[in-house]
Amino acid sequence: MKVCIGLSGGVDSSVAALLLKEQGYDVFAMFMQNWHDADATLHGDCEWEEDRFVAEMVARKIGIPFYFIDLSKEYRQRVVDAMFDEYAHGRTPNPDVLCNREIKFDAFLQAAQRLGADCVATGHYCRRTETRDEAGNPVYHLLAGTDPGKDQSYFLCQLNQEQLAKAMFPIGHLLKSEVRRIAHEADLPSADKKDSQGICFVGKVDLPTFLQQKLAPVEGDIIEVYDAYYTDHPQYRFQQETLSSLTETGHANLITGYVSEDKQTPAAAPNVYLPERIAALSDETLFRLSQPLQYDLHFETETYKSGKHHVRKTRYKANPFGAVLGRHEGAHFYTIGQRKGLNVGGHAAPLFVIATDIEKNIVYMGEGHTHKGLSRSCLRIDPEAVHTVVPSAGMKVGEMRRCRARIRYRQPLQDATLICRANGLYLLFDAPQRGITPGQFAVWYDGDELLGSGII
């Protein structure tokens, strides 16, 4: 079998290439350049010229043919332009997921096949298994990587059966430490190379600068929302009452606890929702339960005299529900859960973006990791945005299923209930989730197997 390894210059794809060669495959390497414009790339990060040089040295060391391909046009059209469009509409996309679906296992795969490849291999930490259906046809399953700290199945959550049929993941069964050890023992030039960071094939960027290539800066208000605002907020009250009605105790926790940026635990024990009560919820109730809070704060101004010369100035009157903290350069540059980049200080606890209003160009913020605006328990995926890896494992309208899910890469898997209704697929988490973000991918698993995904 002839296999094309996507050689990036990193240690993971290098070891994947080595293992394939040792296993007797007819292997050749192909390095793809997907980005030219370095204007927004932070200096020294993900410079493709250096990556190509290292990749070529690795191929020479292993003894496999090396090819170069420029897919920057396809990448800009199918990943970057889509990314700009999502941000312009107030959503936060995941370009790494799009890159795998649109480039690595589509445009790159087609280029590899033109060179005679039967399959494409990558250095992803995930696994693929094969079973047979009743008719004897192959069925491909996507499994998490063995290393829990490096599992990258999330990034491959949009692959279909045709793409998985042509995919190989040679290091998915290994720990990262084992990959490093193999690279050192083989004296591969990439053995000590640091893992890449930032946007896939673009690198680590200053996001507002990167987005300003197409999205113009527009000044708007930064508004802090106080805890008192939620006391009489109809949507927050509705969520509290509805979620509490699903429990035997009549009380539900709506606040996510905090451990670190990558790890979350509930502030109290996870909610225990009764399946029969979930099933009894109407489609309309579930839809409303899944909707993020909308903010509508108004601030009055007053004039006052300042200094010994009694200069007349204008300020906002005190408001028990919030305050205008300053100005930003465009609500579309910010995402829910974001902490840095707004240059607002003077608070005892960190400030986080809890919502953005693109039409009014307002960024709403809340103080503290357990601010009410950061947590949500239910999300909805439009029926057309639901992707099932194995079609036969899809859900029927009215069906419910327990699963483990995540809403971002490296988030520990969370216990949840999948609810399939005519107006969407819902994920109801046992513990409220911090920073559920429109445009991101929610992914669900049965054990190690990734069953499906969808855009929040």
Image (tube, helix red, strand yellow):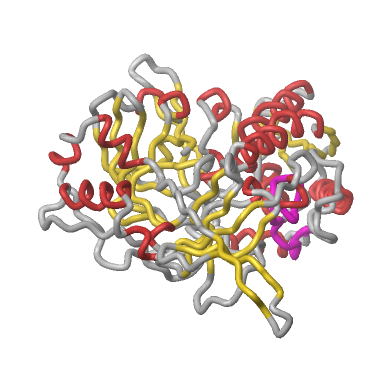
Residue nearest the observer in this picture, 142 or 81: 81
Marks counted in the figure total 0
Residue 304 is at least partly visible in this image: yes
- Main SS of the magenta part reads loop
Residue numbers of the magenta segment = 188-207
Residue 69 against residue 396 in the figure, above or below:
below
354 or 12, nearer to the observer: 354
Task: Please state if 351 lies on the left or on the right of 399 as rendered.
Answer: right
The image shows residue 233, relative to residue 390, as above or below, that is: below
Residue 217: x and y in percent read: 74, 47
In percent of width and height, residue 340 lies at 63, 64
Horizontal side of 430 relative to 369 (left or right) equals left
Near-viewer residue (354 or 260): 354
Which of the 4 quarters of the picture holds residue 134?
top left
Residue lying at the far bottom in this picture: please name it: 308
* Residue at the top extreme of this rendering: 135
x and y percent of residue 433 in the render? Answer: 39, 55
442 falls in the magenta region: no
The residue depicted at 28 percent of the width and 43 percent of the height is 417
Q: Position of residue 374 (x, y in %)?
A: 43, 58
Residue 262 visible in the snapshot? no
Q: Residue at x 69, y 78 (%)?
A: 310
Residue 198 is inside the magenta segment: yes
Q: Is residue 227 above or below residue 84?
A: below
- Farthest left residue? 248
User: What residue is rendered at 35% in x and 46% in y?
Assistant: 447
- Quadrant where the N terminus lies? top right
